Amino acid sequence: MKVLDRERLERFCRKHTDARGWIENWLADVESAAWTTPQDIRRRYASASFLPEGVVVFNVKGSAYRLEVTVAYRTGVVVIDWIGTHREYDERNKRR
């Protein structure tokens, strides 16, 4: 898979250094993966949440942070949409 907007993850890691290891491992997993369905993601990330329009939410470092991406299964692209704390995620979703 090709990951777009990696800079968003880098900015986040500069602020939340405890998440860097998890994010680096996630990036390595994604870049070596060939996800064609949500089930492919579920096999590796059982706690991932799937929303409409290809949006997937990952729990980063247990429940400390959330990573929201859009997966384009046909083209093999993962776009980093948002990353933040669990609290920020809950606040953000009040507006959805």
Image (cartoon, rainbow, N blue to C red):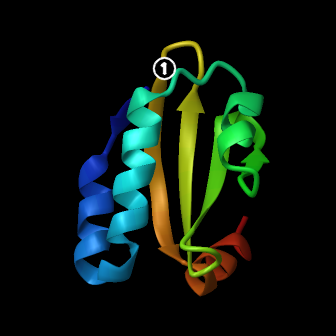
Q: Nearer the viewer, residue 69 or 28?
A: 28
Binning the other alpha carbons within 10 Å of mark 1 as few (below 14), some (14 to 19) or many (20 upward) gives some
Name the residue rendered at 43%, 63% in the picture.
22
The residue at the far top in this view is: 74
Quick check: 65 above or below 4?
A: below
Where is residue 16? Give x, y as percent: 34, 81
Where is residue 56? Give x, y as percent: 65, 47
Q: Is mark 1 on a helix, strand or loop?
A: loop
Name the residue rendered at 59%, 24% in the picture.
35
Residue 47 placement, left or right of 60: right
Question: What amino acid is labelled 1 in the image?
Answer: Gly
Residue 15 placement, left or right of 67: left
Quick check: 16 above or below 3?
A: below
Name the residue rendered at 70%, 71% in the picture.
93
Name the residue rendered at 62%, 74% in the picture.
62
Report which quarter residue 43 is drawn in.
Answer: top right
Q: Nearer the viewer, residue 50 or 28?
A: 28
Quick check: 35 above or below 15?
A: above
Quick check: 34 above or below 18?
A: above
Q: Mark 1 points at which residue?
A: 76
Where is residue 14? Give x, y as percent: 22, 76
Q: In which quarter of the image is the N terminus?
A: top left
Where is residue 26? Give x, y as percent: 45, 50
Q: In which quarter of the image is the C terminus?
A: bottom right
- Please count the marks in the image: 1
Residue 53 placement, left or right of 70: right
Q: Which of 1 and 75 is in front in this view?
A: 1
